[in-house]
Amino acid sequence: MPSTRLYLVRHGATQLTAEDRFAGAVGVDLSDEGRWQADLDLLADEHRQLRATVDALDEADLDRVAGGRPLAWTIRGAAAHDLYHAGQIQLLKTLAPPSRRAAARKGAVR
């Protein structure tokens, strides 16, 4: 007799996740951690799309002027902006209470 496999897919943390329980798709709101995970997933997806778009550009596209500056300049500015905020996030992590820092190292808080 063939075996049956059941796959449970988690789309984000809920209060039930903290209790190590599973629930259906309706009626369970994401916890703060779940909303944070969803935001991180959205950010990662947007970055993937941006990288794919930039990878598809050729040199002529990068030299094209948009908003008074070459497109390459604008792309570098966006990357520098992201790096600046990434640095701020790292600084805030160091200022977090020890319990939050420990959770961040375990991957529970990003």
Image (cartoon, rainbow, N blue to C red):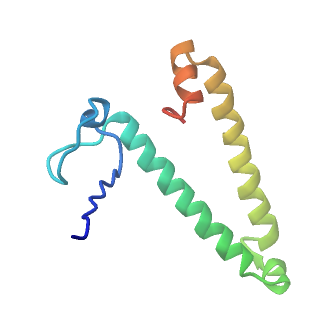
Which residue occupies 30% across, 58% down?
7
Q: Is residue 21 left or right of residue 91?
A: left
Which residue occupies 29% across, 38% down?
14
> Which residue is farthest top?
98
Residue 23 coordinates in the image, percent (x, y): 19, 46
Identify the image quadrant of the C terminus: top right
Residue 65 coordinates in the image, percent (x, y): 78, 78
Q: Is residue 1 left or right of residue 65?
A: left
16 relative to 52, above or below: above
Q: Is residue 69 visible?
A: no
Q: Is residue 17 left or right of residue 58?
A: left
Identify the image quadrant of the N terminus: bottom left
9 relative to 110, above or below: below
Q: Nearer the viewer, residue 62 or 51?
A: 51
85 relative to 11, above or below: above
> Which residue is farthest front?
1
Residue 94 coordinates in the image, percent (x, y): 66, 21
21 relative to 78, above or below: above
What is the quadrant of residue 21 in the picture?
top left
Q: Is residue 4 visible?
A: yes
> Which residue is farthest left?
27
Residue 100 coordinates in the image, percent (x, y): 52, 20
Q: Nearer the viewer, residue 71 or 33?
A: 33
Which residue occupies 37% across, 41% down?
34
Q: Is residue 105 left or right of residue 5?
A: right
What is the quadrant of residue 35 in the picture?
top left
